[in-house]
Amino acid sequence: MTTLAIDCGGGGIKGSVLDEAGTMRAHPIRVPTPYPLPPSLFVQTLVDLAGQLPKAEKATVGMPGMLRHGVVVSTPHYITKSGPRTRVLPELVEQWEGFDVQTTMAEALGMPVRVLNDAEVHGAGVIAGAGLELVMTLGTGLGFALFDGSRLAPHMEMSQAPVRWGLSYDTYIGEHERRRLGDALWSRRVGRMVEGLRPVFLWDRLYIGGGNSRHITPTVLTKMGDDVVIVPNSAALIGGARVWQLLID
């Protein structure tokens, strides 16, 4: 069976069609994330993107924020006027909270759909399925997912946890701070984050992905240790096919 995989970010939305092994059957297509972005425009954007790709039999959507059973509890970027770090619009907060993305997308696409946090989908594309595996994605902010074997743990918004100076992890190691600090100083922050969380989770393997993972300096990578692996951003789409094999409560 083929899967339409759509990865929704703060700056762009990309999609492809993959087979069960996670091999892409179409060149990925990317469109800018439109703002302001009410749920209706979000759904239409994904439907339009799907229309440019080969037909698939099921679909996976990964998007930022806290989701439970395909329903939005909160989402950080899509409630703003012009994208990340811009003004939050109260009317969008109201529209997004409690929005059943999974049911709505299934009806709009006419196929079974699974909607998860984007880091969880990313993780599905890289985990080995053995031991406690943690996935962090570095992009606009911090994405986070935890797996025990092939079972996905309930989602935790680690991005919103306070770290220092009144900053959350989202702002402490997000894209805005990387641009402000430069890669070297920003990488040291990422290293401190990893070492701070290591005794909390005692993972067997930590995977770091997302578009900004490539900016971590070799010196910091070496210090992180052999239990930390950098993974390609393509996992965000590959995971779209593999996520259907996960055990999800």
Image: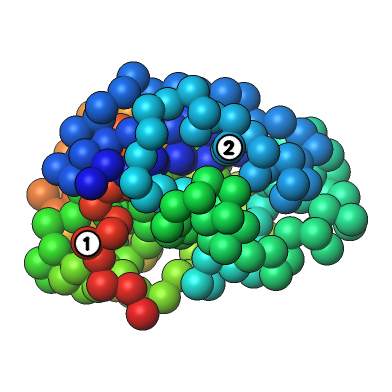
Query: Nearest the camera: 92 or 4?
Result: 4
Camera-side mark, 2 or 1: 2
Q: Could you tell me if residue 228 is visible in this image?
A: yes
Query: In the rendered structure, are the residues bearing label 2 and label 1 in contact, judged by CB atoms less than 8 Å apart?
Result: no
For the C terminus, give its image quadrant.
bottom left
Q: Quadrant of residue 73?
A: bottom right
Q: CA distance from mark 2 to mark 1?
A: 24 Å
Assess disc 2: are there few (<14), some (14-19) or many (≥20) residues with their C-alpha within 10 Å of its C-alpha: some
Q: Quadrant of residue 131?
A: bottom left
Left-right relation of 60 to 129:
right
Which residue, given by chain and number where applicable, does mark 2 sit on?
Answer: 47
Expressed as whole percent of the image width and height from the top left, the position of residue 25 reads: 25, 27
Residue pushed farthest bottom?
249
Left-right relation of 140 to 128:
right
Which residue is pictured at 14% across the width and 43% down the height?
A: 21
Disc on the earlier residue, 2 or 1: 2
- Secondary structure, mark 1, is helix
Answer above or below: position of 11 versus 5: above
Left-right relation of 5 to 242:
right
Which residue is pictured at 11% across the width and 49% down the height?
A: 226
Answer above or below: position of 10 versus 154: above
Residue pushed farthest front?
110
Query: Nearest the camera: 31 or 205?
Result: 31
Expressed as whole percent of the image width and height from the top left, the position of residue 156 reads: 47, 70
Of the residues shown, which amino acid type is indicated by label 1?
Answer: Gln
Q: Could you tell me if residue 119 is visible in this image?
A: no
Which residue, given by chain and number where applicable, does mark 1 sit on?
Answer: 245
Expressed as whole percent of the image width and height from the top left, the position of residue 43 reads: 65, 44
Query: Nearest the camera: 168 or 222?
Result: 168
The colour style of the image is rainbow
Which residue is pictured at 54% across the width and 61% down the height?
A: 102
